[in-house]
Image (cartoon, grey):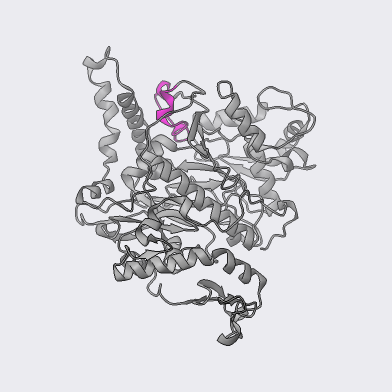
Amino acid sequence: MIFLYILAALFYFTQSPSFTIDFSHFTSLAQDLRSPKYNKNQGLRSPVYKFNPSSELNKLLTKKESYEFSWDHWVNLTDFYSTGKPKNFKFINHLQAPFSAPPEMSGSPEDFRFMGQYYLANHARSPNKLIYLDKKQTKTFIISVENDFEKKKNTRVFDIYKTIERDNLLPPYTPLISASTPLANKMFLFNDSDSLSLFNLDFDSLASIHEAHDNDNSTENKRLSSQELEEIHHSRIVSSTLATIDMIPKFFQEVWLTLTPYLGLHYDWRFFRQIRPHKDATHTLHHLVRTWSDFTMREGIISWLAHGALLGWHWNGLAMPWDPDVDVQMPIAELDRLARRYNNTLIIQNPEEGDGRYLLEVSPAYVQRSKGNGRNNIDARFIDIRSGMYIDITGIAHKGQEEPEIVGCKAPHWYHQNSFFPLRLSSFEGAPVYVPNNIHEVLIDEYHDYEKPEYSPYMFSQDLRMWVDSKTCENFTNNEFKYATETGSPELTMYGACDDKDIFELYHTTKELTERRFKELECIKNNSEHEIYDGLPVIDLISKGPKKFTPFVEPHPPIYPDPRYISTLP
């Protein structure tokens, strides 16, 4: 332990860009941590580690005034507490909260599973707050208000964003009651030119607010409002970030597997357990989307589908089978609000939908709107802490005075500002989402042949309204055998499902959703959204909120089978 503290102190005071620690030095410490006597908060641990997030949620709700957060209550760390031998790896910057860099070398899934659990048990910062999406209301709890930002004259990169400044103004363990503007019943958003100001945010001016306050002697004895305190605090954070922006390391880190590195690139290393089989990954993405939709609709957070997710929306309203993540975008002003109010928040899924738990994080580099050092093109992530899979979130801002009508992200992808607004309410993965106003302009720039119904090895089946494997379905072309009519209405046969039970099952669980999606596309194309369908005008059917959209996977989906028994390849 003394060795650890010496290394940490040396790094802190020398401001070295990085340091490495041989994991073998942690052998005795890891053994102590696995001991039944160990507890990181109290020094004692019960003889048997039991993981029960449902019980933990009940404890939070009943003991909110004295609740103490620990990651091993919300993430299963069984492997860490039961493993017999620690792995020999070097960590980079692993003590530099909030930068949670994984080992500098690649490794096996088992290596990363152990290291992620080790990090969560010993070094990961706690969320600033928990948001529970209850059946009837949203419940928010402040978990940590620890902050010494004001005391440090020379704030270092890893001190930035320790807590959300809004939370710092509130007493600990107090439910946060805040006004929000639910969006679920709004068919169109920002159908006016004023909304384009959301793409503008001058971070340099924002960074100077605290300087003006500090130099104003007349405010020395003035009692500031909460809003003024928040603005000053946020200004200091932005100023410090801008001053060190070129040195900021990569914030979001993925998994680099030794044998199949590409398979780990869509998992956050801290929460990675194993490469998910296709069906399990599909279920996980489905619940990521549904919870992001529920959360943003309740809190009035403005976002829309982007990139591969928007392409999936165009075809049938579902994620593409080859796309391992989901992308959303939002205006830069909204991203700034997301960072102020919701950064480092653990969000608990509505129990009627599932038992998901998701960490929302915003990179401090979101204040830089150019590509910079190229390490931080992703501004924020919504991470499933059971699997490590995530939704990528990027901000959209004006390119500059030379092209005032062009907006884009840091990747960069550029669009005309009128391509987005007014945003249109639709559905994706059975959940209400917003999509840009001019889908064609957004997609054609990124995917020149986005309407082509083939993408090797997949093809789009109009009969099934879904993407299927080309080789699996290439010999099932006889339309006479695709449907049976014994019941009076056409029913898909196994032949029609390419004699594949997974295709047959997926068709029946998504057919209502995709049929409604096709009708919506037809109405958009013909400008007939008031046409009656399923007893309601299409425009009303879409705008009624999540209860009108059909879920197509079971609630409480297990991360199954146990990750320890899943092979490396899907």
Quadrant into which the N terminus falls: top right
Q: Quadrant of residue 210?
A: top left
Above or below: residue 322 compared with residue 469 = above
State the residue lying farthest toward the front. 488
Task: Find residue 285 and report its horizontal and vertical position in percent.
Answer: 55, 55
Measuring from the top left, give residue 567's x and y in whole percent: 72, 60
In the image, the segment drawn in magenta is 150-170
Residue 46, located in which quarter of the rendered image? top right
The total number of labels drawn is 0
Residue 106 located left or right of residue 29? left
Does residue 531 appear in this view? yes
Q: Quadrant of the C terminus?
A: bottom right
> Is residue 367 in view?
no
Compared with 293, 482 (above or below) is below
Q: Is residue 168 magenta?
A: yes
Q: Position of residue 263 (x, y in %)?
A: 60, 60
Q: At 23% from the left edge and 52% from the top edge, which residue is drawn?
A: 400
Who is closer to the viewer here, 438 or 425?
425
Residue at the top extreme, as displayed: 221
* Depth order, front residue of 97/541: 541
Q: Is residue 141 magenta?
A: no
Up-down relation of residue 487 to residue 356 (above or below)? below
Q: Nearer the viewer, residue 329 or 255?
A: 329
* Residue at 31% from the left image edge and 43% from the top image edge: 333
Q: Closest to the observer: 261 or 311?
A: 311
Q: Residue at x 43, y 53 (%)?
A: 432
Residue 345 lies, in percent from the top left, at 49, 37
